[in-house]
Amino acid sequence: MEFEVNSIDATKQLSSCHIIGIFEDGELSPSATAIDSKCNNIISNLISQKDLEGKPGQCLMLHNVPDLSSSRLLIIGLGKKEKLKDKVFIKALSAAAAAINENIEDVACYLTEVEVAEKDIDWNTRQASQILTASTYKFDQLKSDDDKTSKALGKITFPASDTNTETVALAAKQGGAIADAMSYVKDLANLPGNICTPTYLADKAKELAKSSKQLTCKVLNESEMAKLGMGSLLSVSKGSREEAKLITLNYKGGTKNAKPYVFVGKGLTFDAGGISLKPPAQMDEMKYDMCGGASVFGLIHAVAALELPINVIGVIPSSENLPDGQANKPGDIVTSMAGKTIEILNTDAEGRLILCDALSYVEKFKPEIVVDIATLTGACIIALGNVAQAVIGNDQDLIDQLIESGTQACDPAWQLPLWDEYQEQLKSNFADMANIGGKEAGTVTAACFLSRFTEDYNWAHLDIAGTAWKSGKEKGATGRPVPLLVNYLLDKAYGND
């Protein structure tokens, strides 16, 4: 996507489509006022005739407006001016994105000029850039139709004053980078399990590393993991013909001695549950069990594109979880890289088995912080639905920063407790711990399990089981929590925390 930022009056800006906002009380935004004045009160007349009410997300597309420098005028409702907050603004942007058809090659978006409570034009622009860019996404590379078409939108112009052009341009670039990273995540996650295997992910990591001189890639195979004692991770791949991989992407944008920010993403490219077989209904969606790993790919993609001046490491343990004669059985006991033994009471609780060894592995990087991201528990969907991802950890400052980043990025997270009382549910008569803690507080006990491998650094866990993809008619990966994670690293990179 190409971005342009300038102070040209909306009545003189050339574009295929101008996007302007009006409020519910009939008040117009600055650019809407200018266009209305030049174009014979066309907007005011529509309001007086009640063809436009300005309700949040309401939209009307006008064509060939006389005296307008754009062939189309898209009018978006912003609701009541005094109640214009971030969620209403996002709704308006989403409505605008949905209204842009495939014949529109470029737009001039003037929604960013309005005042959103507790936000500035840079935030407005980042969100608009992200949402409008993301609207062009399609996953059709596996369809054989000859009439494949993608949205032609290739340029977005944003308004700025002579004094803030540089910061607005940076915000537009950041929003576009987030959207591109989300598309990268969606492409990986939407691929079927017979294509997106652990080896495929490893190859994509090597390809991604070639995109930046600051980025390197290392992939461990099963024999190399065995030498490190990763018995927990390797136990999951025993039921698959696909070899497990441990993928590391290392971005060095900061000083040599600066501690890295480390992100660990669950990369289960397909999860049938193993011997504890999942029900067949919607099992196809278990290709999305690698969305945590995909989000780490997307995060590294954005960090490299924005050339952030920090050190970031992404680690993706990747495997399949299938039933086979050699697969884990309920009651089996395995030994993790940390030397702790684990009784596997349910083979479908495999994500924590591959994550725990990866979390032990990353200790060698002497991290500033570690965040793991995983579609870990169905209990998280019951608790939080598809609105917020759960966040749990051993460092309250880190948790608070992630929650704030999610709020700023409109990609929310909600904290759940990590209390010693829940650790009791993981007791085993035969091993150091069980891999499940019963039906109560499943999201919390899963985090309790991981916490036993993160005692030597500051750590947080994001359970994205409810937010990583959608089912039904809109089935597909969402790209979350890339906005939250990129926002967190932008704050770290530029000292805004």
Image (cartoon, rainbow, N blue to C red):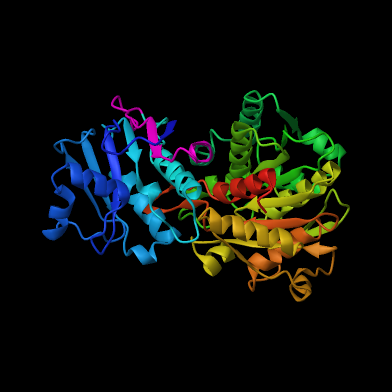
Q: Quadrant where the N terminus lies?
A: top left
Quadrant of res 301:
top right
Q: Residue furthest front?
A: 162
Q: Is residue 13 visible?
A: yes
Q: Is residue 435 visible?
A: no
Q: Residue at x 69, y 23 (%)?
A: 213
162 up-or-down from 28: above or below: above
Q: Residue at x 84, y 47 (%)?
A: 363
Q: Quadrant where the C terminus lies?
A: bottom right
Residue 226 at x, y = what percent? 83, 39
Whether residue 116 sits left or right of residue 50 in the image: it is: right
Whether residue 367 sits left or right of residue 496 in the image: it is: right
Q: Residue at x 23, y 43 (%)?
A: 35
Is 162 part of what is drawn in magenta?
Answer: yes
Q: Residue at x 16, y 42 (%)?
A: 39
Whether residue 421 sits left or right of residue 347 in the image: it is: right
Is 427 part of what is drawn in magenta?
Answer: no
Q: Choose between 417 and 330: the one closer to the eye.
A: 417
Residue 118 at x, y = what percent? 50, 60
**Magenta region, residue range:** 144-169
Residue 409 at x, y = what percent? 53, 53
Q: Main secondary structure of the magenta part?
A: loop
Q: Choose between 355 and 348: the one closer to the eye.
A: 355
26 up-or-down from 283: above or below: below
